[in-house]
Image (cartoon, helix red, strand yellow):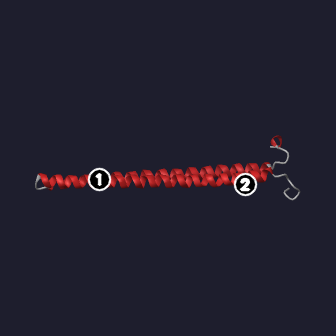
Amino acid sequence: MEQFRLPGVDMSAVIEARRKDIEALAEANRLAYEGMQAIVKKQQEIFAQTMQQLQAAAQQYGTASNPAEAMTRHSEFVQQQLHQALENMRALAETAQKAQAEALAVISQRAEQNVKEAGELLQPKTKSRG
């Protein structure tokens, strides 16, 4: 490391700052990955719920006593499914937004620390700093 030394620059502080950068990126990646896992889990739940509802609807259509009743049930089912689809989209969007916000917060915090550390590194060394 001697060959990379710059006068007045504390290389150990520079290396420590880069280590913190890597830690922040790793944390942001972990949060993003967890967010994606939550989205996949929610999608699986939505699929299972939808399949159950379709089975229940098929059974109900078979028990309708007349075509008008079947059409009414079908119309109600379609309305419920549209409402549920919108709710599911909202929930998935919230999950994605939360994961992105958490990851961005880690990166933003580290960027703020970088600015502070850069200012400290550029200060002239004094005898008290080492």
Q: Please, which residue is most extreme toward the top here? A: 3
Q: Position of residue 48 (x, y in %)?
A: 33, 53
Image quarter of the N terminus: top right
For disc 2, the neighbor class at 10 Å (few under 14, some 14 to 19, many from 20) is: few
Q: Which residue in the structure is indicated by mark 1?
A: 81
Q: Residue at x 69, y 50 (%)?
A: 19
Q: Position of residue 104 (x, y in %)?
A: 57, 52
Q: Give the structural element (helix, strand or loop) at label 2.
A: helix
Q: Which residue in the structure is indicated by mark 2?
A: 116
Q: Please, which residue is most extreme toward the left here? A: 66
Q: Is residue 129 left or right of residue 115?
A: right
Which of the marked residues, 1 or 2, is nearer the chain's N terminus? Answer: 1
Q: Is residue 90 left or right of residue 126?
A: left
CA separation, marks 1 and 2?
52 Å
Q: Residue at x 72, y 54 (%)?
A: 116
Residue 45 in view: no
Q: Residue at x 66, y 50 (%)?
A: 21
Tell me the kind of residue under disc 2: Lys
Image quarter of the C terminus: bottom right
Q: Give the structural element (helix, strand or loop) at label 1.
A: helix
Q: Nearer the viewer, residue 43 or 83?
A: 83
For disc 1, the neighbor class at 10 Å (few under 14, some 14 to 19, many from 20) is: some
Q: Please, which residue is most extreme toward the bottom here? A: 128
Q: Residue at x 84, y 57 (%)?
A: 129
